[in-house]
Amino acid sequence: MAQLVMAAATPHNPLLWRTMHEPMPDDLRGVADNFALIGRTMRELGVDVIVEVGTDHVRQFYSDNCPAFIIGKADSYHGTFENEVRTFGMEYCEVQGHRELADHIAGRTVLTDAIDFAVSHEWRLDHGFIIPLAYTTPDFDIPVVPIHVNATLPPLPRPERFAVLGRHIAESVRTWESDARVALLTSGHMATEIGGPRQFMGAGSPDPDFDRDAVRWFRDGDLEAAIAGCTYERIMAAGNVTYQHVNIIAALAAMDGRPADLAEATESRYASSPFFLWRNA
Amino acid sequence: MSKYMINKLMRAIEMSDSAVVAYVGDTEAFVDAWLAGGAGPDSVTDDRALTPEERAAFIARDEAELYRLGAHPYLLWHFIEAVWVHEVPWPDLNERYREAVRPHGYPDYVC
């Protein structure tokens, strides 16, 4: 049987792409080090496949057709969009897919009773997926099963569903007849505001209280508190795009709600960055 | 109100380099050409429409008005960034944007 050898959460802030270069700015050193730690852990644990839970930023999936949960079944994915190349200086890339595991997670003929996935055979991955991969697997040499969760265009899935998603991914890996070693990589935010009156106000978080609480949930392995603390109202009060934080709940649930080995809201010139890591092997 | 169409037009412009250039070059012509497009027998329903105040806000590149009218904040910021950044340095644009939207708080952008 396959093995879920680790779970992790990283930021996907595309502004890092323009600023996080050697010589490393002092305020970004912690972010760079944590990305490197998670990438190194993937290599140490011999990860063969990455299941990546993230959120497309209204690039691939807009309000004309926006699924709550969608899984990629493509053999490969183009990375990033013209506007992200323009705005963030990102580079086009290719990401290899993994159809067999995608089929197993989604259910091949009948939808799983846990999460009713939509599927996509044609998907261009935006920065929410590419940035975490670019910093942890810069050669894009590990196949990926992307799962988009709508955290941008209300109505949004409830936090409880992210726990269900995480458990479902873990169970799918456990029951996959393969000797593959699988990583769950989620990406999201701590308190973050984009497009509102609190955006980019300098170093620091728009809601340090939320960030402290959130780090504690994962550090202590308190899944119930994480779900209870992520009401729509509380999260939006923390910043108008903070909802992507709930992606990390999937990682905690996939690790049976045990404390993370690394739980940190790493400070930088941008809003605090989520870095969470569970080793499972 | 047609928040969906506000967002749709912002997104259509911001995601294409050539659309950004064309829009900035002649906002009124671009917006009116976009409004004149839409559904045909071989395309999906696309009843493009903006209210007069929405149309005026696009022609003026007026972030405060679009925000007040219910533009999705994430889409709005990246739209504004795309269509102003060559004329206003990024730090100034960011500060101007924050000041422009602050009086309006957090409008309902759900569409």
Image: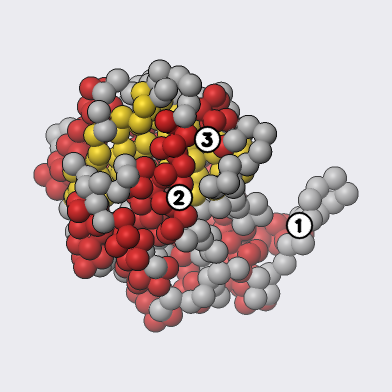
Extreme residue in the right direction? B41
Tell if the residue under mark 2 belongs to the same chain as the one under mark 3.
yes
Q: Could you tell me residue A254's position as x and y percent? A: 36, 42
Residue A248 vs residue A276: left or right? right
Q: Residues within 10 Å of mark 3 (few under 14, many from 20)?
A: many
Subunit ID for the residue under disc 3: A
Does label 3 lie on the same chain as label 1? Answer: no
Which residue in the protein does label 1 denote? B46
Residue nearest the observer in this picture, A95 or A276: A276
Is residue A236 visible in the rendered image? The answer is no
Q: Nearer the viewer, residue A83 or B3?
A: B3
Q: In the orientation shown, which residue stands out farthest toward the bottom? A: B103
Mark number for residue B95? none
User: Mark 3 sits on what residue?
Assistant: A105
Distance between the Cα atoms at labels 1 and 3? 35 Å
Query: Disc 1 vs disc 3: Cβ atoms closer than 8 Å?
Result: no
Percent position (x, y) of residue B65? 51, 75
| Tag 2–tag 3 contact (CB < 8 Å) | no
Amino acid type for the residue under numbered disc 2 = Val
Q: Which one is in front in this view, the residue at disc 2 or the one at disc 1?
A: 2
Disc 2: which residue: A164
The three-letter code of the residue at mark 3 reads Ile
Q: Is residue A74 visible?
A: yes
In the rendered image, which quarter contains the C terminus of chain B?
Answer: bottom right
Name the residue type under label 1.
Answer: Asp
For the residues labelled 2 and 3, the Cα–Cα distance comes to 13 Å
- Label 2: how many Cα within 10 Å (few below 14, some 14–19, many 20+): some
Q: Position of residue A251 (x, y in %)?
A: 35, 44
Q: Nearer the viewer, residue A103 or B74?
A: A103
For residue B5, which quarter of the picture? bottom right
Q: Is residue A41 above or below residue A54?
A: above
Rendering coords of residue B26 (x, y %): 61, 58
